Image (spheres, rainbow, N blue to C red):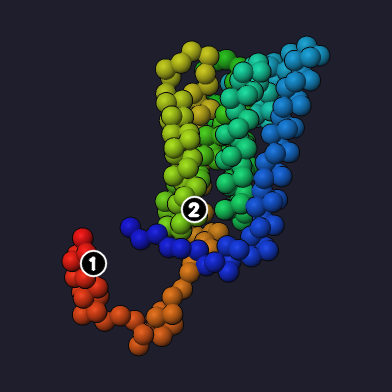
C-alpha cells in the first residue's frame, strides 16, 4: 500500500500551524472542563453519578447529554483525560472538517445505544469519547494513506491498542457497552467521511513533466546498483 507524503507547503503553512494550535487548545479546554466538573462534584459531594445513562429509564435520558462529563472517582477521571486530549488533538488537527460530524456522533451516539440496549446500571465517563475518537483516527489514517494521518494512526495504536479489550465484558464495573458502541461509531464515521480532509500530497517534478520521469530501464539500473552495494 502506497502512503503519500503531504505537500510541504501545506504542512508548514500558517493555516496548518493555526489549526494545530486551535486543536490542542480546544482539546485542553474540554479536558479541563471535565476535570473542573468532577473535582467540584467530589469536593461538594454533589453525587453527580446519578445523572449517568440509566438504560430504559426516562430519568436516565439526561445521561446521554451529561454522562461523558461525569466520573466515578479521581482515578477514573485521570485514566480518561490524557487519551481524551491526545485523541482530541489528532482528530481536530488532521480532520477539522470531519470532526464537525465525528464529535457529536461519538459524544451522543454511545449514550443513545447504551440507553436502548445496555445493562440496567448507571453508565458514566468520557471513555466513550476516547474509544470513538481513537477508533476514528486509527481507521481514517489507514484509509487516507497520507503519511501524517498514517503516523497518527500508528501512534494511537501503540499508545492505546490495549483499549480493544475494553469492548468485551471481562471487567466488572466497566461499561463495555459504551466502549463497543463508541468504537463502532468511530469506525463507521471513518468510512463514511473518508473523502474529507484529504490534504494535498507532495508532487514530484516528473509528475508535471512526464518526459523527465525515469524510464523502466533506468529504474532497473538503479536497482541493480543498489543490489551491488548490498
The answer to whether any part of residue 116 appears in the image is: no
**Position of 97 relative to 69 (above/below):** below
Q: Quadrant of residue 110?
A: top right
Q: Residues within 10 Å of mark 2 (few under 14, many from 20)?
A: many
Q: Nearer the viewer, residue 175 or 211?
A: 211
Q: Which type of secondary structure does the marked residue at label 1 adopt? A: helix
Query: Which residue was labeled with disc 1?
Result: 226
In the picture, which quadrant includes the N terminus?
Answer: bottom left
The answer to whether any part of residue 154 appears in the image is: yes
**Position of 43 relative to 160 (above/below):** above
Question: CA–CA distance between discs 1 and 2?
Answer: 30 Å
**Which mark is on residue 49?**
none
Mark found first going from the N terminus, 1 or 2:
2
**Position of 75 relative to 82 (above/below):** above
Query: Which residue was labeled with disc 2?
Result: 149
Q: Nearer the viewer, residue 230 or 193?
A: 230
Q: Quadrant of residue 161?
A: top left
Q: Nearer the viewer, residue 139 or 32?
A: 32
> Residue 92, image x and y in percent?
62, 49
Q: Residue at x 40, y 59 (%)?
A: 3
Mark 1 against mark 2, which lies toward the viewer? 1
Q: Residue at x 35, y 88 (%)?
A: 211
Amino acid at each position: 500500500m502506497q502512503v503519500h507524503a503531504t505537500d510541504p507547503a501545506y504542512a508548514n503553512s500558517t493555516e496548518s500551524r493555526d489549526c494545530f494550535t486551535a486543536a490542542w487548545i480546544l482539546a485542553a479546554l474540554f479536558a479541563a472542563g471535565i476535570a473542573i466538573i468532577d473535582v467540584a462534584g467530589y469536593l461538594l459531594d454533589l453525587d453527580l453519578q446519578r445523572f449517568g445513562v440509566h438504560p430504559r429509564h426516562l430519568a436516565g435520558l439526561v445521561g446521554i447529554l451529561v454522562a461523558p462529563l461525569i466520573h466515578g472517582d479521581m482515578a477514573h477521571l485521570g485514566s480518561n483525560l490524557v487519551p481524551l486530549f491526545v485523541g482530541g488533538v489528532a482528530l481536530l488537527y488532521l480532520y477539522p472538517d470531519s470532526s464537525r460530524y465525528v464529535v457529536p456522533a461519538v459524544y451522543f451516539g454511545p449514550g443513545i445505544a447504551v440507553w436502548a440496549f445496555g445493562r440496567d446500571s448507571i453508565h458514566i465517563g468520557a471513555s466513550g469519547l476516547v474509544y470513538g475518537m481513537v477508533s476514528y483516527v486509527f481507521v481514517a489514517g489507514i484509509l487516507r494513506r497520507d503519511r501524517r494521518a498514517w503516523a497518527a494512526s500508528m501512534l494511537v495504536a501503540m499508545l492505546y491498542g490495549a483499549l480493544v479489550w475494553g469492548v468485551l465484558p471481562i471487567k466488572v464495573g466497566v461499561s463495555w457497552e459504551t466502549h463497543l458502541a463508541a468504537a463502532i461509531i468511530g469506525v463507521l464515521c471513518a468510512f463514511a467521511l473518508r473523502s474529507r480532509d484529504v490534504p494535498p500530497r507532495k508532487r514530484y517534478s516528473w509528475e508535471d513533466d512526464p518526459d523527465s520521469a525515469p524510464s523502466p530501464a533506468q529504474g532497473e539500473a538503479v536497482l541493480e546498483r543498489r543490489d551491488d552495494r548490498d
